[in-house]
Every structure is written in C-alpha cells, then in structure tokens.
Image: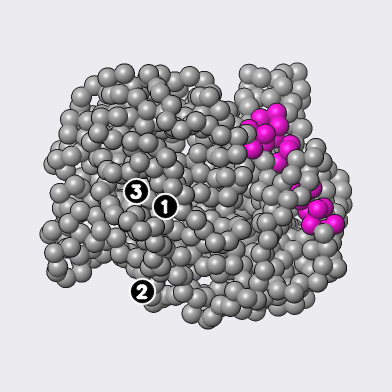
Amino acid sequence: MTDFSQPPVAARRPHSFTHHGITVTDDYAWLRDPGYPEVTDKAVLDHLAAENAYFDAAMAPHKGLTDTLFAEMKGRIKEDDQSVPQKDGDYIYWRAFETGAQYRKWYRKPVAGGPDQLILDETALADGHDYFRLGAMSVSPDGRLLAYAIDTNGSERFEARIKDLFTGDILPEVIPDTLSSLVWTSDSKGLIYGIANENWRTDNARLHWLGQGVESDVEIFHEDDEGFRVSVGLTSSEKYIVISTGDHVTTEAWLVPANDPTATPILVAPRQPGREYDVDEHDGTLYIRTNDAHPNFRLVKATLDAPDQWSEVIAPDDHFYLTDFTLFQRFYVTEGRQDGLDQIELRDYATHSPKRIPFPEASYSAGLDDNPEYDVTTLRIGYESMVTPDTIYDYHLDDGRLEVLKVQEIPSGYDASRYETQRLMIAARDGTQIPVSIVYPAGLPRDGSAPLHLYGYGAYGMAMDPGFSTGRLSLLDRGVVFALAHIRGGDDLGQQWYLDGKLDKRVNTFTDFVDVAKGLIELGYTSAGRIGISGGSAGGELMGAVVNSDPDLWGAVVAHVPFVDVLNTMLDETLPLTPGEWPEWGNPIEDKAAFENILSYDPYSNVKAQTYPPMMVTAGLNDPRVTYWEPAKWVAKLRATKTDRNLLLFKTNMGAGHGGKSGRFESLHETAEEFAFMLWQLGVAG
C-alpha cells in the first residue's frame, strides 16, 4: 500500500514585506520563477515534479475507478457528433467530430448546391502539440477567406492566420500574440484585431491589409489606461466595427465604418466611472444597453449624429435583469433573467412591446444560439435544464412555433424519470434568500445519509446556469446529490447580486456558500462531512476561503487553478490581469482598507493550524490568469501548517493553461480523475 504520510515538502525561505504599516510573511514566494512566463528554475520544477509524482502515486490505486468513470462519461458522448447546420450568406456552415477525434472539423457547402467543403481541420492543426485551442475565427464577407487564431501551449497568446477557402492555401502573413476577435472590413481586404502587450493586456486595435507585412499594420485605437482591455466586434448590420474598451465596471465604445476602417472613430459616449454600456446599430439608430440609471440595466437609443444623447426604450426593472440584446432587420431580441430565470423576448422597432418565448420547466437555461444573419424568419435557440439534455430549436416568427432541430444524444442511454430537480431558496445568515439548483436520484431519502456535491463560483458577475451535464450522471447514478449554489458575486439575480459579493462585500460570497451547505443539511439532503465541494479560478478562491472558515463541513474539496494568493497578486501590477482586477477586488497598493479587507479573507494568508478536509488542487504551468505559483504556494503552506493527516494532492499540468488539458477526451479524463477523488474521499462505492 502506498504511504501517503510523506508528501513533498517545499522549503521555507523566510520572506516578508510591509505595506500600509502591516507586515505580511510569505515564506513560499520563491516558488514564483523570476523568469515567468518562462519557468526554468530547477528548484521550482523539481518541486512541481515531486508533487505530480505524489499525485500519481496517490491516485494509482484508484485508477480502476477513474477508468470506469471515464468510460461511462465517454459512453455518453456521441463521438461522430455534429452541430445543426446554419445558413450565413451564400453558404451553410456546421462543425463535426469524427469518431475518436479530440478536436472538430469545420465545414460548409453552397446554399445553391455543391459538395461539402472542409474549411478548417482542428485535428490537423493540433497534430504534434500536447495542447491545442482554436480561438477566434471569421469568414470574410465575400466568403473567400478564413481568419483564425490558435494557441498551442495554453498561454492564451494566439497566432492568427488566414486561409484562402477557394484554393486551400494558407496566406503568408502570420499575426502573433493576438488576443481578440478577428473582424473583416466590408471589402474583405482588411482585418481588425488586437495584440497582447508585454503584460498580456490588449490595449489596442490594429488594421492589417492583406498582402502587406504585419510589421506595417496600423494601430487605429490605443488605450492608455492599464486597467482597461480593448475588444473589437461588428454591429448586427455589419456596417460598423465596434471598438470597446473597459474594465469590470466602466466601458467606452467607438464606431468605425466597416467600409472605411481608417476613418476617425466615432465616440458613442465618454467613459464615466461605474457606467457600463454596449452598442449596436439599426438603420442609423444606435441601441445601447446601460446601467447608468439602475443596476439591472435599461435599453436606450440615440442617433449617429448625437450618439451620447440617449432616450429610453426599455425602462429598468427591479426584477428583470437585462443581460443582452440582438438587433435584426425587422425586429430585435432582448435576453435577461426574471427573478433569476432566463427569458427571451422579441420586440418590434415601432412599439417595442415584448413577446416572450415560453419554456416548460421551473428551472432551466435558455438563450439565443447561432443567428449569424440580419434578416431572418426563424430564431435559433438553445435550451437545457439539469434533467433535460441540450436542445436546439428554431423559433418560427410567423406562428410562434418551437421546432426541435436536435436533442443531445446520449449513446449509452438516458432516462430523465430517474432524476428529480428543484430550485430551492435557502436563507443566508443575513436573511438573504439564496437560490439553489439541485438534482438528485428519484426517490432520494431525506434522512441526511446521501453524499452531496456542492458547486459554486460567485465572482465577476458570472451567473451559474442550471444546465445539463452528462458527466454529472456518474455521480447521480452512485447516489450523490448535485447542488449548484447561486451565491452573491455572480449576477444570477441581477447586477445588485453581483455588487453584493465584491470589494468590501466579498465575504458574502463565502458565507452564502457555507449557509447553503448548512441549509441543505437541515433539509435532509446530506450531512456534515458528506459534502464534496469544487470550484475553479475565482471559484477556487471560494474553496480556499470556506476550508479555512468551516473545514468540518466538507468531506472532499477540489480546487481547480484556484485564485488563492489574492493579496500578493493584487499588489503586483506587472501581472497580466492585476490593474483590470482592482475594480473587482480593490486596489491594495493605494487603499489601506482594500489591503486589510483582502488580507482578512485571502486563502493563502489565512491558512492556520487546524484540521483540513481531503483536498485535490490543480494548476497550469502556462496559466496567465491564475499563475501556477498561487496554488503551489497555498499547498506548500497547507502541508506545513495543517494538523491532520488527510490527503492533500496537487497536480500541475506542465503543458497547459487555465482550462487544463485540451481535447474533449483529455479534459474528460481530468473530470473522471476529480470525481474518482471525490467518491473515494466520501466513501462512495465505485
């Protein structure tokens, strides 16, 4: 039997710093390679290798369970699957997996008839690489050229290339370090894009003319604020290129004619701290979604001649959160959430009166799917719930009919009647009602005996949709309850829900999660110590906070690429994301109160001598979002400080980034590994 009592021990090298008169120790600071993003320090690499070896040794006796879970999950995936074809101009486009393939192939065929054409082969592009990810891709207006970007190491520094779809040739120009969409000019001769600067921040929009050297590309927009990021896009009519810049709380947009990309950009409205907006155009009228009058946003309109003079179209609402809008030639669509549930509404330009599309279940996820054309008679819609597989509809505008085009196929079989789902409301300690989406085996006894997997995120205003998961069935079929906590910090119940979980209210996110767990125990779904929890990135920060505050609740913890060294990262403005993150977490460099607030919950700083639950932690060596040393330092400090002998595993993907391994089966294997660890630690039979 493997001896888990002797895990790798990182050296403690005394280090401290003082800021705002407060001294902080950081004895594992050495795990950050000073040459990052290149990691060559032998001591660092040796330590990560030792941790990976320990991880492999600990999981080896459970390889059978991991393999079983992987086989189950793979058996639920239709290997030769393809998307529903969609018309865009003169062609119909779709993408498909072949049996056994890790990556997709992208196809099209002429609407007028003709053979299928393979326009992009991800499998061929990924050949020879341990990691592959396709980023932005865009077909030129004349249908001849395909611009696409690829990442082959997980660093998210994409390389853009251009393919002639008529000849199959790859054009000679290569654009390195792109970090944006790829937007064509109207004449198909120019490409708008943004590159990452040395700090991995997109502070520009550039114009590339086909046939010219990339070194002669023209910068048409530059952002001077290091906290802002620049993105590019097209209006629905494709008449204007939209250049947007902003951070987490403030935005500003400029318009450039798509047929004259070197024209002076039109400023929609100057940035105002705390005001966000996004813009689209229809017949010379600008439509703008903004939070200037209410956290839940409203829709306004303006003229191109006076783009900053806004008149209200849709008033804000305390219960309806306007999340998006899409303009079409004869109507437009608004998307949002009514008391946390997705809604899609069609509106005409004359009266703006809404027509809501009804959905059958009490808890679900729904939204517009692929709708590339401006003049349409049907809308492509996606729908799923925790018990309903992903379903693609066409909504017919003339009679309001929902036509099923595709239901996610599960080759090994699926019987929805075997599972039950509910939307619960559980009171947090301050009285706030927290929504919880839950799914469990039908007939589950409410006697507290069942193991439960609780998932959370709670940051950046990102809602967690109650969607379908084929992988999750491997837990449910073993009697595990799955619950999704819609905690503050996300925008599940509107923008105020997000505001109530950030900055000086950040702790609400952590206490909401703990209180949801306690509420589920009170309702008989599980009991203390029978709860496995997981979260990634900012959700990994959540994991770090709640194991510090309430370790006895959890029977197993999985923290993926966890953002656990919050204070040190927010103090380092040279890191890629830091300046842009200050509106989310606070700026501890300048603000003592922000420093003290972050220090009060920072998972790494608050590791203490106590019993911790069994934990599995992951990292990506090339991760530019949560750098590898954050989880490495956290695990090292936990090993040196905690008082228990519970298992603590740490795995670093040496050739991947924030999202872990690429490829649909490689990533599936990592999920199987996570579930095997959780089932093992919760004592659930494999």
Horizontal and vertical percent position of residue 148:
29, 51
Residue 72 found in image quarter: bottom right
10 Å crowding of disc 1: few (<14), some (14-19), many (20+)? some
Task: Residue 536: tell me if it is visible.
Answer: yes
Residue stretch rendered in magenta on the structure: 497-522
Residue assigned mark 1: 368
Q: Which mark is residue 136?
A: 3
Horizontal and vertical percent position of residue 399:
36, 58
Residue 27 found in image quarter: top right
Horizontal and vertical percent position of residue 147:
25, 49
Task: Residue 567: tell me if it is visible.
Answer: no
Choose mark 1 or mark 2, whichever is in front.
1
- Residue at image coords 60%, 57%: 363
Q: Earlier in the sequence, mark 1 or mark 2?
A: 2
**Does residue 211 appear left or right of residue 553 in this picture?**
left
- Residue at image coords 40%, 19%: 270
Residue assigned mark 2: 98
- Residue at image coords 13%, 64%: 112
Three-letter amino acid code at the position of disc 1:
Leu
Residue 13 found in image quarter: top right
Task: State yes or no: residue 519 in magenta.
Answer: yes
